[in-house]
Amino acid sequence: MEYIEEHRKKHRRLTKTKFAKRVLFILMGAILVSVGLEIFLVPNNIIDGGITGISIILSHLTGFNLGLLLFLLNLPFLIIGYKQIGKTFAFSTLFGVIVMSVGTVFLKPVPGLTADPLLAAVFGGIILGIGVGMVIRFGGSLDGTEIVAILFNKQIPFSVGETVMFFNIFILGSAGFVFGWDHAMYSLIAYYIAFKMIDVTIQGLDESRAVWIITDQHQEIGDALLARLGRGVTYLNGEGAYTGEDKKVIFCVITRLEEAKLRSIIDEIDDSAFLAVGSINNVKGGNFKKKNIH
């Protein structure tokens, strides 16, 4: 009984720790988004995609407060998300949207750091992407179009990413009629940079890669990967469909930073080897540890 009670207390502590961590990083991410918008993008008439982009356009045309529009336009999608996706995601998103909206209100009087639209697009996109990536990584969202894309994913023959991209192309194109086509192109630059930074923030610079190698020199390559790259390998049994010959397939998991070194090792031993590399989101168990490459 004492062990059970101690285990329950430990579980509650872990839950509280995870909850506090989620709140902290969503808070930080939403604040960064506010900074990216009000300090870089909005003063230079550069927009982001999704509900944020629509809010910037409407704020420019009507004079309404941007923070209020961000909250009001996202609210219907949050209600839908609560009913269809789950309350944890909905409340995390609501918290992030509130922080982002309030942040833009407080930062409104602060002058932009640059009047150069290219610099604003680059640095605004970086800051925005990191902020959005942090929020997504810890279970929330800052844009209603993502919720719509998730809900319609099963009804339409497009992925969530493709659906969001369609919305954003339409929204970013609309910026050309409101702010001019130069600013629309700067908006595309900012959106692209933010998109890439979201990926880096979610996956990390040392994103894991799964590697499959088919070669007649499997023992030499396997030993080299173990000795020079420090990665364990697994030999899988395969059979060529055309020749019927037995083949050894080398499987291992590396980080993105190790991929170039792995390719050079393979080329040294067998430059005709078949190599397939794929991104993976999570690695658990075994002796896999991410480490720096020297």
Image (cartoon, rainbow, N blue to C red):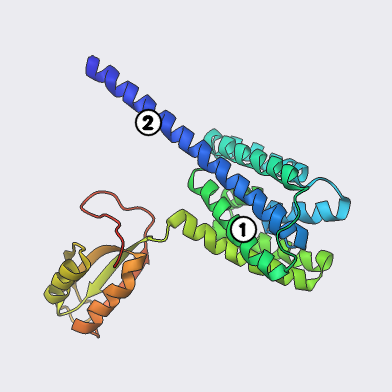
Residue 72 sits in quarter: top right
Q: Is residue 97 visible?
A: yes
Residue 273, image quadrant? bottom left
Q: Secondary structure at mark 1?
A: helix
SS under mark 2: helix
Question: Rounded to the nearest whole Å, what is the CA distance between mark 1 and mark 2?
Answer: 34 Å
Label 1, residues with CA under 10 Å away: few <14, some 14-19, many ≥20: some
Q: Residue at x 81, y 53 (%)?
A: 58
Asked whether the residues under the numbered discs 1 and 2 touch, taking CB atoms below 8 Å apart as contact, a structural biologist would say no
Q: Residue 245, percent across and down?
A: 15, 78
Q: Provide the residue designation for mark 1.
A: 164
**Is residue 88 placed above or below 280 in the rendered structure?**
above
Tell me if residue 140 can be seen. Answer: no
Residue in front for this viewpoint, 81 or 186: 186
Which mark's residue is nearer the viewer, 1 or 2? 2
| In this rendering, position of residue 51 left or right of residue 245 | right
Left or right of residue 147, residue 207 in this image: left
Question: In this picture, is 104 found above or below 210?
Answer: above
Circle 2 residues within 10 Å: few <14, some 14–19, many ≥20: few
Residue at 53% from the left image edge and 52% from the top image edge? 133
Residue under the point 65% across and 69% down: 189
Instruction: Give the image quarter of residue 246.
Output: bottom left
Pointer 2: what residue?
14
Locate the N terminus and report the quarter of the image it occupies: top left
Specify the amino acid type for callout 2. Answer: Leu
Give the residue at x 61% y 41%: 96
Image position, residue 150 (x, y; %): 57, 50
**Where does the image place residue 32, in percent across and percent down from the top left?**
60, 50
Horizontal side of 128 relative to 20 (left or right) equals right
